[in-house]
Image (tube, rainbow, N blue to C red):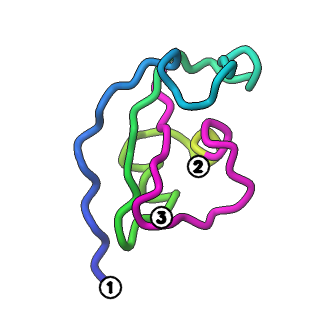
Amino acid sequence: MKLASLPPPTAVPAASSSRKGASSAESGSSFTEYEEYEVVQGATLSAIAAAYKVSVSDIKKANNLKSDVLHIGQKLRIPVK
């Protein structure tokens, strides 16, 4: 199975996130900016994390994910330091 390539990142400031009232202080992370990623067929959290050089745990925290299940078209916030 061939993995889909990841699109180039787009910087999204934390203040413009769709989660109202969420700050890095509330989540306990040191991230102040996020990049947006739209899930494509074949994408996994581990592949996305490796491409953006962050941990799977950081992505899950930034998106309030309880599992590793992703859906095509789902938009994820990818934290950047």
**Along the polypeptide, which appears first: circle 2 or circle 3?**
3
Give residue 21's position: percent from left, percent from top: 69, 19
Report crowding for label 2: few under 14, some 14 to 19, many 20 or more residues within 10 A (C-alpha): some
Q: Which mark is residue 1?
A: 1
Nearer to us in this view, 76 or 28: 76
Q: Find disc 3 in the rendering and name its residue.
A: 44
Question: In screen coordinates, is 36 left or right of 9?
Answer: right
Quadrant including the N terminus: bottom left
Amino acid type of disc 3?
Thr
Vertical placement of residue 10 versus 69, above or below: above
Amino acid, disc 2? Val
Q: Which residue is mark 2?
A: 56
6, 71: nearer the viewer: 71
Along the polypeptide, which appears first: circle 1 or circle 2? 1
Q: Residue at x 74, y 55 (%)?
A: 66
Q: Is residue 65 rendered magenta in the image? A: yes
